[in-house]
Image (cartoon, rainbow, N blue to C red):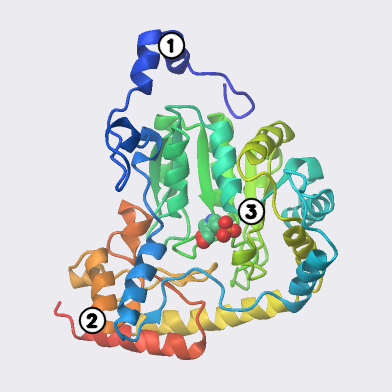
Amino acid sequence: MGASGYAVPACRAAALACPARRAARRAPRRAAPVVGAASGDAARTSDRVSNLQNEGAYAVLAKATALEREGRDIVHLEIGQPGFATPEHVVEAGVSAIRGGKTKYAAPDGAPSLREAIAAHVSTTRNVDVRPEEVVVGPGAKPGLFFPTLAIVNEGDKVVYPDPGFPTYRAMIEVAGGVPVPAPLRADGASFDMAKLSDLVRTQKPRLIVLNSPANPTGGVMPRADVEEVVRLAEEHDAWILSDEIYSRLVYADESDDGGKAFSAISVPGAKDRVVLVDGFSKTYCMTGWRLGWAVMPEHLARKVELLAVHSYGCVAAFTQEAGIAALVGPQDDCVKMVAEYRRRRDFVVKALNAIDGVECPVPEGAFYAFPDVSAFGKSAQEIADGLLYDAGVAVLPGTDFGANGEGKIRLSYVGDTATLEEGVRRIKAYFDGLER
Ligand code: PLP
């Protein structure tokens, strides 16, 4: 059964029916001991979490902060967090909601007024009819990725996802018991290598395909034709699509395929029944710490995801949701100015990187990341990232933090102000100019 059903696969049904196999499934196998915990069984974690990796940005930030404590001056280009403040009218709405007593439990799937605003917003921006019952609000976009995956993927189901791609994709697939099937991107990182993707879908028959456009880490914006082709493949092989559109408002092309916007899988006629669209407030309204995002999905799936919300985080803070309404329906000037400024910063950073001998940086059309190829220096991405941090005092992420296909690349985030970016690229140039090739 595919995108519209929840049949238990035969292998899982057999495992559930057989006591010996059930016991074997319960027995700790490869789980790692927990450092600092009691010995024996109590010291073991489940298989489900044994392969979980941290997001690279946190690890690099920790290393950079340790260096700063030793007195080193570090330029931070590793963080994917907007440098601007949350718009004032949004802050005001949140603060007055707290003062007005919006401090109690709220509906697990989100306040009806916010879900209405999101449904209207998605209907307009994605040119599709969305009802509030199809919207689930969460603390950030991440639950919109994780919980629908838990609700769709059965043990052993294949999930195709972009590599290099946002590290949460692999984590959520593994926790759900799915089998990660990394799909390589084309050379400029703007989209999948469509021939390989098509081959993977045909041979692996995934239950779910993950899209991310505009993308982290490449900044790529998928051409409309490629999104349409992914939908066609999903229909042909009865797969779900999880479309992570958290950077939907950060698109810089004047004349992209869809008039300066990223094209969404949910906009393809007839696709809505198999698409989960994830977006939120973190990047568009500089609200990373407010924890507010949403996912749009078929209503039957929304009700299951709502139950996962009930039993995990319960609900999103009611005052945060009031701020979200203000962000969506209020003035958009701050967002428009921010996009123009990011575009200026992108142009500066990409030009400066391409002026360095041996560095090749495609022009990213969205998000706020540059993902240059530095393979010409004959070192691994990790060696380059470590060299830049320890020798040049610039924190960046190795491409391999986003999957094996990120080898030879590094990710820089250009959210910093002009002075930070100028100093960052000056140090990067000095570092690479000093390397032998
Ligand atoms: N999806 C992508 C591609 C991201 O880069 C991020 C954050 O960096 C998220 C989702 C998570 O967004 P949020 O902070 O709203 O949970």
Amino acid carrying label 2: it is Asp
Residues at marks 3 and 1, CA–CA distance in whole angstroms: 37 Å
The tag on residue 391 is: 2
Who comes first in sequence, dot 2 or dot 1? 1
The one nearer the camera, 348 or 227, is 348
State which quarter of the image contains the N terminus: top right
The one nearer the camera, 234 or 108, is 108
Q: Position of residue 87 (x, y in %)?
A: 71, 76
Q: Quadrant of ligand 1?
A: bottom right
Give the side of residue 7 with respect to residue 59, left or right.
right
Q: Which residue is mark 1?
A: 14
Give the side of residue 268 with respect to residue 231, left or right.
right
Q: Which residue is mark 3?
A: 139
Q: Is residue 37 positioned above or below 246 on the image?
A: above
Q: Quadrant of residue 12?
A: top left
Asked if residue 80 can be seen in this view, the reply is: yes
- Whether disc 3's CB lies below 8 Å from ligand 1 is answered yes
Q: Residues within 10 Å of mark 1 (few under 14, many from 20)?
A: few
